[in-house]
Amino acid sequence: GDNVNTARSIALKCGIISPNDNFLVLEGKEFNRRIRSTPDGEVEQSLFDKIWPQLRVLARSSPQDKYVLVKGIIASKNNPTREVVAVTGDGTNDGPALKKADVGFAMGIQGTDVAKEASDIILVDDNFNSIVKAVM
């Protein structure tokens, strides 16, 4: 994965964040430091809930980080109604997060069989724009 500076630059170019936003752009290591009270400890939902609403980019993240992010948002009590979580992926390592999400989108051309089987929707053209069409 990209380092945090590259990820931030891409997010700015794509409109995910703006230059003056206070949103978080974190690497997986920092993400884990912020959501656990000890380095090898369990994720603490209260710590997780403090950062995820501001988190816009998670760079250099492991498959486990992605799964923890999905699981934590689903378990969050920040809002009176539960968030609906969608995940896109194409690799075998994306399987757990795709399966845990409310909606998993797998790439149909480049995606592995594991990713496709874990997903609810397969994007036959491998085009992220198809996600917008599928949701609308």
Image (spheres, helix red, strand yellow):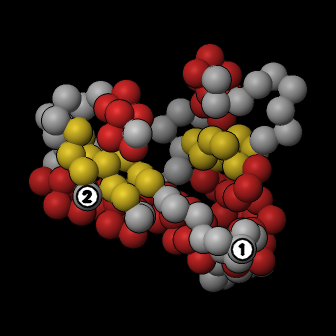
User: How many numbered marks, from 0 up?
Assistant: 2
Q: Is residue 65 above or below residue 106?
A: below
Q: Is residue 62 above or below residue 136?
A: below
The residue shown at (66%, 35%) is 4
Near mark 2 (Cα within 10 A), the count class, few <14, some 14-19 or many ≥20, is some
Image side of residue 136 versus residue 116, left or right: right
Q: Nearer the viewer, residue 124 or 48?
A: 124
- Could you tell me residue 27's position as x and y percent? 64, 46
Q: Is residue 25 above or below residue 36?
A: above
The residue shown at (53%, 33%) is 2
Near mark 1 (Cα within 10 A), the count class, few <14, some 14-19 or many ≥20, is few
- Could you tell me residue 89's position as x and y percent? 33, 47
Question: In the rendered image, is residue 131 in sight?
Answer: no
Q: Amino acid at mark 2?
A: Asp
Q: Amino acid at mark 1?
A: Pro
* Residue 80 disc label: 1
Element type at marker 2? loop
- Could you tell me residue 9's position as x and y percent? 65, 21
Image side of residue 62 versus residue 41, left or right: left
Question: In the rendered image, is residue 95 in sight?
Answer: yes
* Residue 120 disc label: 2
The image quadrant that residue 78 belongs to is: bottom right
Q: Earlier in the sequence, mark 1 or mark 2?
A: 1
Image side of residue 11 versus residue 80, left or right: left
- Check the image and name the residue furthest to the top: 13
Q: Are marks 1 and 2 in contact (CB under 8 Å)?
A: no
The residue shown at (73%, 55%) is 53
The residue shown at (16%, 35%) is 124
